[in-house]
Amino acid sequence: MRTEQYANLHLSVEAGVALLQIARPEALNALDARLLDELEAAFSSLRDDPETGAVIVTGAGEKAFVAGADIKELATLDGVAGRAMSLRGQQVFSQIESLPKPVIAAVNGYCLGGGCELALACHIRIASENARFGQPEVKLGLIPGYGGTQRLPRLVGQGRALELLLTGDVVDAREADRIGLVNRVVPENELLPYCRELANKIMANAPYALSLVLEAVRAGASMPLERALLVEAGLFGLACATEDMKEGTKAFLEKRKPVFRGIVNRQREER
Ligand code: CAA
């Protein structure tokens, strides 16, 4: 097992699955500037790590995933600094969203404000029964600044998103499941085992194809359908140029399990 220790972040990689635990218990894992720096460093390291096939993000302790951006830091902001802080958070969360490996949010406890926005930047969200979700920024005279006004409506639809954004209400895991904010709700003690099992199931597929699916969905989300379909066709072509595609189709025809190596067919690429 490989581990990396940051001031408020624990990273361990075991059997291809990275577990990233946000650990700032005195502030219910609220994200301050240092934690954003640490998240950026950890995700850069995971992006380049050939041993990591999937990432699980969770909060240390039982009470919170992340209770938001750090309100002590927010309280000191003026207009210019507020804009810079928002752009910084957006940049780090976009880095997470564009990771070419699946990122699963294992949401345990409070998932509010910037915490909910962090979960929204992950590719899949699994919640424990005690998870609580909300965008309570308007109660502080603020609006979400790390992508919540954009990713939440894209995920759950404008009406449901606006209800959460305008009321600042906190909803439980069942309601989050009902509106499509999370993929699934599991008992607290099953959260990490379930997320590991899901990561392993995904990792059994061709790694390069996984990265292309993530790219197609992310790039296409901000495009008109016609252009997005062209992007899909280009990435489909790229998948056809991989050794894994030859292996996957051959294995099917030979009625055996494929052995994926996760690499592009270099001979074809060089042509
Ligand atoms: N920032 C900084 N500190 C926080 C925090 C946050 N977001 N959330 C909790 N804390 C701190 C509390 O101040 C408290 O510290 P002290 O012990 O030093 O007083 C400690 O964590 C424990 O919190 P509580 O005593 O409040 O715990 P509770 O169980 O009574 O309540 C809670 C839990 C409902 C989550 C409550 O802490 C809360 O409402 N937190 C703030 C949630 C919030 O508004 N988040 C949005 C922030 S704005 C944002 O995120 C902007 C953005 O989009 C970028």
Image (tube, grey):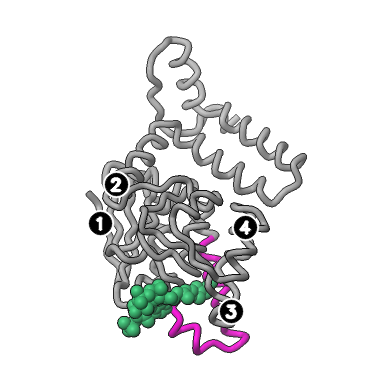
The residues tagged by marks 1 and 2 sit, at their Cα atoms, a distance apart of 23 Å
Type of the residue with mark 2: Glu
Q: Nearer the viewer, mark 1 or mark 3?
A: 3
The residue positioned 52% from the left and 29% from the top of the image is 242
The extreme top residue here reads 254
- In primary-sequence order, the first of circles 3 and 4 is 3
Type of the residue with mark 1: Thr
**Could you tell me which secondary element the residue under label 3 belongs to?**
loop
Could you say where residue 41 lies in the image, as x and y percent from the top left? 40, 64
| Residue to which mark 3 is pinned | 142
The extreme left residue here reads 1
| Residue to which mark 1 is pinned | 3
The residues tagged by marks 3 and 4 sit, at their Cα atoms, a distance apart of 19 Å
- In primary-sequence order, the first of circles 2 and 4 is 4
The residue positioned 29% from the left and 46% from the top of the image is 190
**Could you tell me which secondary element the residue under label 4 belongs to?**
helix
| Residue to which mark 4 is pinned | 160
From which residue to which does the magenta span run?
70-93
- Asked if the residues shown at circle 2 and circle 4 are in contact, with their CB atoms under 8 angstroms apart, the answer is no
Whether disc 3's CB lies below 8 Å from ligand 1 is answered: yes
- Asked if the residues shown at circle 1 and circle 3 are in contact, with their CB atoms under 8 angstroms apart, the answer is no
**Does residue 151 belong to the magenta stretch?**
no
Could you say where residue 251 lies in the image, as x and y percent from the top left? 43, 16
The residues tagged by marks 2 and 3 sit, at their Cα atoms, a distance apart of 35 Å
